[in-house]
Amino acid sequence: MPSRRGARDLTALTVLALLRTGPSHPYELHRMITQTHRDFVTGLPRSLYHAVDRLEKAEFIAPVDTEREGRRPERTVYELTGEGRRELAARLRYLLERPDPDTSVFVAAVSFMGCLPVQEARYCLQARAAALEAEIAGGDAHAASLGRELPRLLLLENEYVGALRRAELAWVRAVVADIDSGTLTWPDDIAELARRLPGGAAHDTEAKGAHDG
């Protein structure tokens, strides 16, 4: 199981997930992150290059080639290793199952949830729903206790947090229901799905074709 700190490294998570779709170099990863609006990745481009260094040292990614365009410096192409695939899955499971006060953590995990098999993702969401139910019950009991001593005005923060948890729980349950009904489908090829995103290879090819035409 990854450490809490490691799992919450959203830049590293993003590098692992994007390399899940195929080898790439950091410049291309940067472009994909910005064009697909992964706003939970902050500190670019420095954070991206630091994440690549950490992941390479941990042997989660490995250099496979170098590319050069014109007079630009050579760019190292990286691919995901077998250990990196296992680490990506472990980090996603960790983040999906556990509620976090930082909503960007769950946004990132949901963004890359398609990297997990559908039933594994469903299991993680079910675990999250159970954890949210426990948090809501505990929060309600605490609020009831405080409500006997304090005016509501001083408890609005607790109400707000409870409302957020209930909204998240309802959404998680709805996604699980959509998986069960087949309304939400899973790709057979995560790489092909990624290429359909803005900034992906297929998108670029289509855009170039339209421009040339």
Image: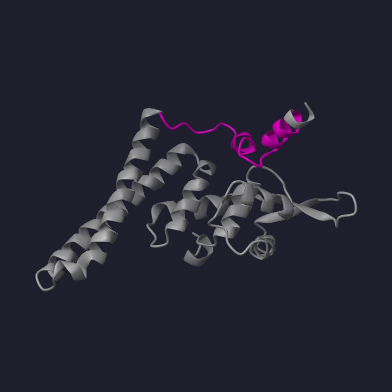
Q: Is residue 72 left or right of residue 16?
A: right
Report if residue 200 lies within the magenta region. yes
Quadrant of the frame with the C terminus: top right
Residue for point 23% across, 61% down: 159
Observer-nearest residue: 92 or 183? 183
Q: How many marks?
A: 0
> Along the horizontal axis of the image, is 94 left or right of 197?
left
Task: Find residue 211 and report its horizontal and vertical position in percent.
Answer: 76, 32
Magenta-drawn segment: 183-209
Residue 176: x and y, percent? 36, 39
Kindly give the residue lying farthest to the top in the view shown.
213
Residue 80 appears in view: no
**Residue at x 72% of width, y 48% of height:** 24
Please provide percent x and percent y for residue 38: 56, 51
- Residue at far bottom of view: 149
Q: Is residue 178 above or below residue 171?
A: above
Q: Does any portion of residue 61 appear in the rendered image?
A: yes
Task: Spot the residue most to the right.
Answer: 71
With respect to residue 66, does 179 lie above or below? above
For image coordinates 44% across by 54% down, the residue present is 106
Q: Is the residue 9 above or below the residue 169 in the image?
A: below
Q: Is residue 55 magenta?
A: no
Q: Residue 158 at what x, y percent from top left?
A: 24, 64
The residue sitting at 67% across, 53% down in the picture is 30
Q: Quadrant of residue 75?
A: bottom right
Is 57 displayed left or right of 73 in the figure? left
Q: Looking at the picture, tell me which residue is in the foreground, 84 or 27.
A: 27
